[in-house]
């Protein structure tokens, strides 16, 4: 429901846009799948995280770009078209990337059901995208009213997932181990922004494109991470995704507001 609602607005034009300028889209997607999983693994090493907690951090780092990133790109004056294109490509690659990255980076902490993850990601991620595009193509403007409310329904579903994770972890949510996850998640997100921005600067992209890649790298589809953590691991593994889901919206809002004001003042 979450992804179907978000991708119901997707049209064939979005895929044509990827084909028209593939280089920044591909580079942004590569940056996302290199920087965020790598950061997750490095932070687990630095903070000596173990077991399900470490697997949960790496899981959220291996997820595709978060749907909130396009909102933050818009609010900051970024290139929304590039943002959506990277988000689309990273999501389409998720069935391959999530099980591969988890097996490689988190296999030392937990047993990773790679095949089950692959099939689940196809069903949960790719099928809703295909259905969303088909429904939009068939019904067009007839479903405009539904499209307007679907993001709200999707956000409500995300809140339900977060609530379920918190409920399942109420006994562990304020433990010392969980408290350590909070700075790890914050650093993961903030370093993702910094490295995404640095990467876009190295590429020599314009400021709107820099903003898009910054948010696309630093923001994750954490609701997907929480869903997989609850399904394939123990509830504790979902805590990093839950914290990430809350924190990246706070940090993204602050960064987008600062960036918009900074851009205005610089001209």
Image (spheres, helix red, strand yellow):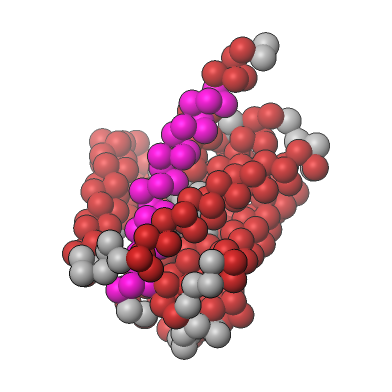
> What residue is drawn where x is 32% and y is 55%?
2
> What residue is drawn where x is 47% and y is 88%?
111
Q: Is residue 256 above or below residue 227?
A: above
Outermost residue toward the front in this view: 176
4 inside magenta stretch = no
> What residue is drawn where x is 41% and y is 56%?
182
Residue 209 horizontal/vertical position (percent)? 67, 35
Q: Is residue 240 above or below residue 253?
A: below
Front-most of residues 178 and 34? 178
Q: Which residues are magenta?
A: 235-260
Residue 218 horizontal/vertical position (percent)? 55, 49
248 inside magenta stretch = yes
- Quadrant location, the C terminus: top right
Q: Is residue 83 above or below residue 3?
A: above
- Quadrant location, the N terminus: bottom left
Residue 72 horizontal/vertical position (percent)? 48, 35
Predominant SS of the magenta segment: helix
């Amino acid at each position: 429901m979450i992804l179907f609602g978000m991708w119901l607005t997707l049209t064939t034009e979005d895929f044509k846009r990827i084909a028209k300028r593939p280089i920044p889209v591909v580079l942004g997607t590569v940056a996302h799948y290199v920087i965020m999983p790598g950061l997750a693994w490095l932070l687990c090493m630095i903070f000596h995280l173990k077991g399900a907690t470490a697997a949960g951090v790496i899981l959220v780092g291996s997820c595709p770009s978060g749907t909130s990133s396009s909102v933050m790109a818009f609010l900051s004056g970024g290139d929304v078209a590039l943002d959506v294109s990277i988000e689309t490509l990273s999501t389409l690659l998720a069935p391959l990337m999530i099980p591969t990255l988890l097996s490689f980076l988190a296999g030392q902490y937990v047993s990773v059901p790679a095949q089950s993850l692959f099939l689940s990601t196809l069903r949960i991620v790719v099928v809703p995208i295909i259905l969303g595009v088909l429904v939009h193509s068939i019904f067009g403007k007839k479903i405009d009213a539904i499209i307007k409310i679907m993001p709200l329904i999707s956000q409500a579903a995300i809140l339900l997932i977060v609530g379920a994770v918190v409920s399942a972890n109420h006994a562990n949510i304020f433990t010392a181990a969980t408290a350590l996850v909070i700075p790890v998640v914050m650093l993961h997100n903030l370093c993702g922004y910094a490295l995404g921005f640095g990467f876009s600067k190295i590429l020599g992209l314009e400021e709107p494109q820099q903003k898009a890649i910054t948010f696309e790298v630093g923001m994750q589809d954490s609701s997907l991470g929480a869903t997989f953590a609850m399904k394939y691991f123990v509830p504790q593994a979902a805590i990093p995704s839950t914290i990430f889901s809350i924190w990246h919206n706070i940090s993204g809002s602050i960064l987008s507001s600062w960036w918009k004001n900074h851009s205005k003042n610089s001209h």
